[in-house]
Amino acid sequence: MIRFVLTRLVQSLIALAMLSVVVFILARFTGDPLHLILPMSATAEDFDNARRYLGLDRPYHEQYLSFVGRALVGDFGTSIRARKPVNELLRDRLPNSLKLACFAMGVTILFAFPLGVLAAVHKGTAVDRAAQVVAVLGQSLPTFWVAIILVEFVSGRLQWLPAGGMDSLASYVLPGFTLGWFVVAGMMRLLRSGMLEVLDSEYVKLARVKGVSERRVIWQHALKNALIPVVTFAGIYFSILVTTAIVVETVFAWPGMGRLAYEAITARDFPVIQAVVLMTAAIVAAVNLAVDCLYAVIDPRIRYGS
Amino acid sequence: MAAEAASGLTAESATGAPLADARPGAAAPAARPTRRLPWISLGIVAAFVVAALFAPLLAPADPYEQTLRLRFRPPAWLPGGSLAHPLGTDRLGRDLLSRILYGARVSLSAGVVTVLIASAFGAAVGLTAGYYRGRVDGVLMRVTDATMSFPVILLALILAVTVGPSFPNVVLAIAVILWARYARVIRGQVLTLMELDFIAQSRIAGAGAWRIITRHLFPNTLNTLVVLVTLQVGYVIIVEASLSFLGAGIPPPTPAWGSMIAESRDFITSAWWASLFPGLAILLVVLAFNLLGDWLRDTLDPKLRQL
């Protein structure tokens, strides 16, 4: 078990190192950021000074190594646009994104679990059909469009909920639902097919024969095993959530990492781009690692490598 | 890995999705409904393909022509609307219907081209990994995992700013991530196929790696590929639209549904049609592809689990 975790950890670290190179190269292709930060009237001398000041005149490999060295101790440099330490920006934004993601995850579980389980238990009935409609719509609706329409109707015309920002619990509702919606569809489908498979198995029949109440059979015996495929895909869901968050945070003016990424990229803010991408990748990698471990814990077949 | 490993599924129990699902065997009415072709989905997809191919013939106006005097004309059935602009006009007085018809070109071609590139590459990786196993498999699958966990939109945004937003870059950015899904699924299938007798027999008959992969393994993964390809066209259309919406997709003035929504967004209160209709177009075509994909899966490959 420890060996398994260590191997996966080393693999994740190698993947992160490779990604850091890719990100660095891509960020340097972005064109000259100086054109964005210096006034139109700047002379060639101003450009040279700024370049030296920001360390952009040094050879690329030196820039890369110093970047990695400092990143390892948690120093991502200074934002070119905000002229603040990137750390500070991350510290401000990351918790907001995590809060939104948690809310969205809560929404997902709240909807996907009952829907997926009930659809399987009452296969072919109206419940099942309704669940299918939710699933198919969830995967067919463009998030940004849903967000805009919701803002217009729920916040604009009906004035029920705030349209953006992050002032109160009410402002979580729209972005949280928009973000969770896509994942609800996928998770519900996995749960449904997982439940169908498990409900058909011998041990569920045995539990019934033993006289275990139907509710316990479904929600304890069956659900536990139907969760295995859901856990498998949890890492992918998380990365989908991160991706969708960029769009959702941009539309709802949510002060999180997704919007920071969008702003940094449009402003060619190298240090921030690098930090956000690496941070995101590190978080995604950590979640995947955690999922793998969790998976090994709940499914002994993986642990023993069969 | 896990999904395949854990699946000792029966065809009956694993049908993932199922608008066309058969009713349960035990409690069901006597006859199982036969699987009818999904005419509605096919019809919608066909309609959009026709729209894309014949946009110049079908469009009532030039999608680029701006008439500022005719800004934000409402759809024909509302007061102030006219049949000259059946769905109304946008903020520059361009005909909305024409732009949506031309937009189908961008969306459909982005969807199809991306998915074809991604599936070809992914299938090649999956076949290689599954055939050679061992170290090759280990390395390829780690790369696949790393790729799969990278957020598509983040990469596309970076590419859009570094190399500039354009059609090829959008396709490339999405395909670079999307292949991983194919590699995973195909590899899983190949691992199962490799255990079967006919592979051993063809090896005894003297078939080399290339022949086994192309003649025996690949044809047996085709069903899965077709299903995945169909299901992912819709996904790619949504991603492309999201990118165009963020300004990192197809650059204006080319009509793309995502950027049309972005341009009209600030005026949604007064001119809702300019934001609503392009979104409905996305919804319709993606819905049709997804339903078609579900149907194909139930028909061709009921064991395939889908995200």
Image (cartoon, coloured by chain):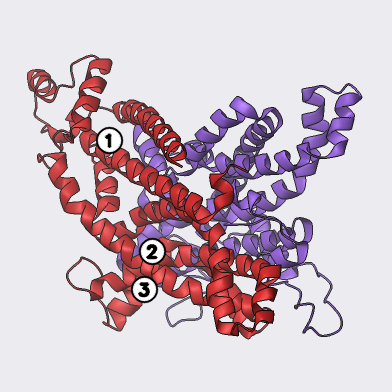
Lateral position of residue A139 relative to residue A73, left or right: right
From this viewpoint, is residue A123 visible? yes
**Mark 3 falls on what kind of element?**
helix
Disc 2 chain ID: A
Disc 1 chain ID: A
Question: Who is closer to the viewer here, B18 or A115?
Answer: A115
Q: Residue furthest right?
A: B205
Quarter of the image for residue B285 reads bottom right
Which residue corresponds to mark 1? Answer: A274
Q: Nearer the viewer, mark 2 or mark 3?
A: 2
Type of the residue with mark 2: Leu
Q: Which mark is residue A179?
A: 2
Q: Whole-percent x and y of residue B191?
A: 71, 39
Lateral position of residue A244 relative to residue B205, left or right: left
Between the C-alphas of marks 2 and 1, the distance is 24 Å
Specify the chain shown as red.
A
Which residue corresponds to mark 3? Answer: A150
Ranked by sequence position, the earlier of labels 2 and 3 is: 3
Ranked by sequence position, the earlier of labels 3 and 1 is: 3
Type of the residue with mark 3: Leu
Question: Who is closer to the viewer here, A7 or A285?
Answer: A7
From this viewpoint, is residue B274 visible? no
**Mark 1 falls on what kind of element?**
helix
What color does chain B have in the rendering? purple
